[in-house]
Amino acid sequence: MTQDIYLTGITTTGTPHIGNYVGAIRPGIAASKDPSTEHFYFLADYHSLAKNEDPDKIARSTLEIAAAWMALGLDTDHAFFYRQSDIPEIPELTWILTGMTAKGLMNRAHSYKAAVQANEERGNADPDKGIMMALYSYPILMAADILMFKSTKVPVGRDQKQHVEMARDIAQRFNHHYGETFVLPEPVIGEHTAVLKGLDGRKMSKSYNNTIPLFANEKRLRKLIMKIKTNSLEPGEPKDTADSTLFEIYKAFATEEEARDIENRYAEGIAWGEMKQLLFEYINEHLKPAREEYERLIANPGIVEAELQKGAEKARQRSAPFLAEIRDSTGIRRLG
């Protein structure tokens, strides 16, 4: 039986927050420990260029995200953990794939269509106003990320399924034209992926500015948790856990028994201030060891860089010979 190869891209924009941890980092690290599968995790720094982010923010985010995964226990000896820009075969493959990518396929990309719609809603005569080629064509870069390492499974949210489908379309066209070369990847939709609410009750997201940074220091962590929106029920009044952000976050970290205990305390009318203090103490204790390691890594970025270089070297043992095959199949060959 062929071993499944999983590939996960991690965007290098912003500071990791507890929603990222619960929804992606924790399950990703747990999955990477399965000896029957291979896992590739890459920092998608080229993708961040499509948004014209501040250069210093991109560099800082790369450090923070890499340090977070390492501090939380990613086994970089077993998993492939690398920075996208350290794999020169990726941009070369991206260009090769443009020759097999229909413009109409890119026209249907969700991100491009959303940008066009925004222009139309603003009344711009040019539907492409302000749209850069990086945004338009980045699904091809994503296809290169996926296809380069012969990924069979790509964990994505439902809204990102299209990227994997596009990679399949491009791979099929290439295989038809040049012969069987690429493995056709399948999306793995996280039907039960945990999505946490943020400080204001909406989905925790950098876009809403309502996040709790994963490794905020104790003082800031407590301050943010105390800001979490609650209803006006008084102490002693029974409370419902169903729409409680405090309970949702607690449950994401707690055991089933601990969660049941808090459910009982909600029914007994626990005060919101008491629940916030309890949540702070619980999360703080849970994250403390990893936070200490994270702070050590942030203070010593050379350690993080060394791990990324090690990962890139290991990844390139796959990408370099495979690109040589691809080049040969397309007629880009030495003459003697």
Image (spheres, rainbow, N blue to C red):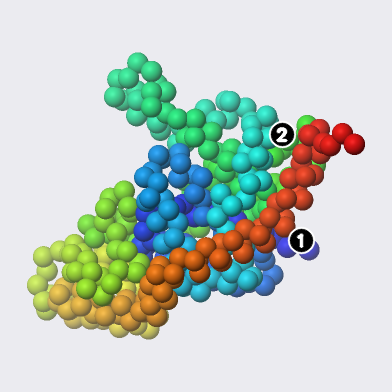
Label 2 crowding class (10 Å Cα cut-off): few <14, some 14-19, many 20+? some
C-alpha gap between disc 2 and disc 1: 23 Å
The residue that appears at 19% across and 69% down in the rendered structure is 223
The residue that appears at 76% across and 41% down in the rendered structure is 326
Q: From the viewer's perspective, is residue 72 above or below residue 100?
A: below
Q: From the viewer's perspective, is residue 189 above or below residue 286?
A: above
Q: Nearer the viewer, residue 42 or 143?
A: 42
Label 1 crowding class (10 Å Cα cut-off): few <14, some 14-19, many 20+? few
Instruction: State yes or no: discs 2 and 1 in contact (Cβ < 8 Å).
Output: no
Q: Nearer the viewer, residue 119 or 81?
A: 81
The residue that appears at 33% across and 54% down in the rendered structure is 205
**Residue matched to label 1:** 2
Q: Position of residue 232 (x, y in %)?
A: 11, 65
Answer with the quarter of the image where residue 274 lies: bottom left
In the structure shown, which secondary structural element does the residue marked by tag 2 occupy? helix
**Residue matched to label 2:** 173
Confirm whether residue 203 shows in the render: yes
Q: Is residue 133 left or right of residue 234?
A: right
For the C terminus, the quadrant is: top right
Amino acid at dot 2 = Arg
For the N terminus, the quadrant is: bottom right
In the structure shown, which secondary structural element does the residue marked by tag 1 occupy? loop
